[in-house]
């Protein structure tokens, strides 16, 4: 009976002062001092383990909830990305994609994120953009940057400040729609002079895999020259133009629409 009472008060025995331990020993003379210490330690150790297990279970619940929220957001973004491919892919087939074209005025549009742990993705876009700058530079050539995203701006401004024509931040703060993207694309086209726009982005393949990609958009003037010289610039020549608009006007409208659709896809 003395041992049962001692088990109930074991935890207090270990946490008590020496005088209190001596008092308990006097109350239970059948139990020795080592027994008091061992029973108290056992009770306290069990309580610590139970508390830790409860804490771990609570953390597991929080982590599970965070995973569910992250998975839901990822599915929504992935769905928007896949749906937006139907916008720009037909333009690539119609107007073509000629990355090897040699022109005097190049504009590199580097698409990066504003924040987050996307170091590898942003660094890849920056590296490809720098490589393009070296490839398209020359004595009679001019290459400018248009940077979408704070991460790309921070990295490129270090050694390419003089080549930066325009920067846009907080574009991906909230889900964007085509109207916002169309205004942005129109603003870019009005503020830069170009013969070719080279858009650098990371193409989504899976949750853990992105492929560095570049798409080229030619100005209507360059596209007409390429077409007249026998170059392959898409399937536009396979269609007949009807109505009062000239081919130059149609190319101007299609180029602007292609650029906005491309940004719409690549900023998701």
Image (cartoon, helix red, strand yellow):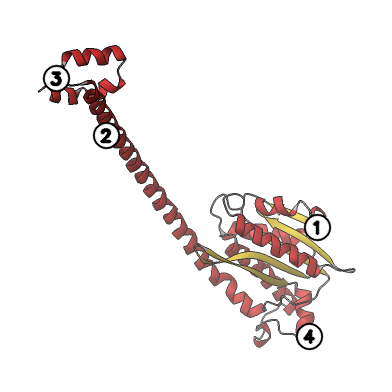
Give the left or right position of residue 2, taking residue 35 as reference.
Answer: left
User: Is the residue under label 1 in contact with that under label 3 (CB below 8 Å)?
Assistant: no
Q: Position of residue 227 (x, y in %)?
A: 75, 84
Q: Earlier in the sequence, mark 4 or mark 2?
A: 2
Q: Are marks 4 and 1 in contact (CB under 8 Å)?
A: no
Residue denoted by label 3: 30
Q: Is residue 138 left or right of residue 213?
A: right
Q: Which residue is mark 2?
A: 46
| Picture residue at 58% right of the left edge, 65% below the top | 265
Please give the name of the residue rendered at 28% of the width and 36% of the height, measured from the top-left corner.
50
Secondary structure at badge 3 equals: loop
Tell me the SS state at disc 1: helix
- Determine which of the numbered discs, if any, sits on residue 163 in the image: 1
**Of marks 3 and 4, the one in the foreground:** 3
Quadrant in the picture for residue 21: top left
Q: Are marks 2 and 1 in contact (CB under 8 Å)?
A: no
Which structural element holds mark 2? helix
Tell which tag, 4 or 1, sits nearer the viewer.
1
- The mark that comes first in sequence, 3 or 4, is 3
Q: Nearer the viewer, mark 2 or mark 1?
A: 2
Residue 158 spot, x, y in % from top left: 76, 51
Find the distance from the CA under tag 3 to the CA under tag 1. 89 Å
In the picture of the structure, the residue carrying the numbered disc 4 is 228
Measured in 3D between alpha carbons, the distance from the residue under mark 3 to the one under mark 4, in whole angstroms, is: 109 Å
Check whether the beta carbons of the residues at disc 3 and disc 4 lie within 8 A of each other: no
- Local secondary structure at mark 4: helix
């Amino acid at each position: 009976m003395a041992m049962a009472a001692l088990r109930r008060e074991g935890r207090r025995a270990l946490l008590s002062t020496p005088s209190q331990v001596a008092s308990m020993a006097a109350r239970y003379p059948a139990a020795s001092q080592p027994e008091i210490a061992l029973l108290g330690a056992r009770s306290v150790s069990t309580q610590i383990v139970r508390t830790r297990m409860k804490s771990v279970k609570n953390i597991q619940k929080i982590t599970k909830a965070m995973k569910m929220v992250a998975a839901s957001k990822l599915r929504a973004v992935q769905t928007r990305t896949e749906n937006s491919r139907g916008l720009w892919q037909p333009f690539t087939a119609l107007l073509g994609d000629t990355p090897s074209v040699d022109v005097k005025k190049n504009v590199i549009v580097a698409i990066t994120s504003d924040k987050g742990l996307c170091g590898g993705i942003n660094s890849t876009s920056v590296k490809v953009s720098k490589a393009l700058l070296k490839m398209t530079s020359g004595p009679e050539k001019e290459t400018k940057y248009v940077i979408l995203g704070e991460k790309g701006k921070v990295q490129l401004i270090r050694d390419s400040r003089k080549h930066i024509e325009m920067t846009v931040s907080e574009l991906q703060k909230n889900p964007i729609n085509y109207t916002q993207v169309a205004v942005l694309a129109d603003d870019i086209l009005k503020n830069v002079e170009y013969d070719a726009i080279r858009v650098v982005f990371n193409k989504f393949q899976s949750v853990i895999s992105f492929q560095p990609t570049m798409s080229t958009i030619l100005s209507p003037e360059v596209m007409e020259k390429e077409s007249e010289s026998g170059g392959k610039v898409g399937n536009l020549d396979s269609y007949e133009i009807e109505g009062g608009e000239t081919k130059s006007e149609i190319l101007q409208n299609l180029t602007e629409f292609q650029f906005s659709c491309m940004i719409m896809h690549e900023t998701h």
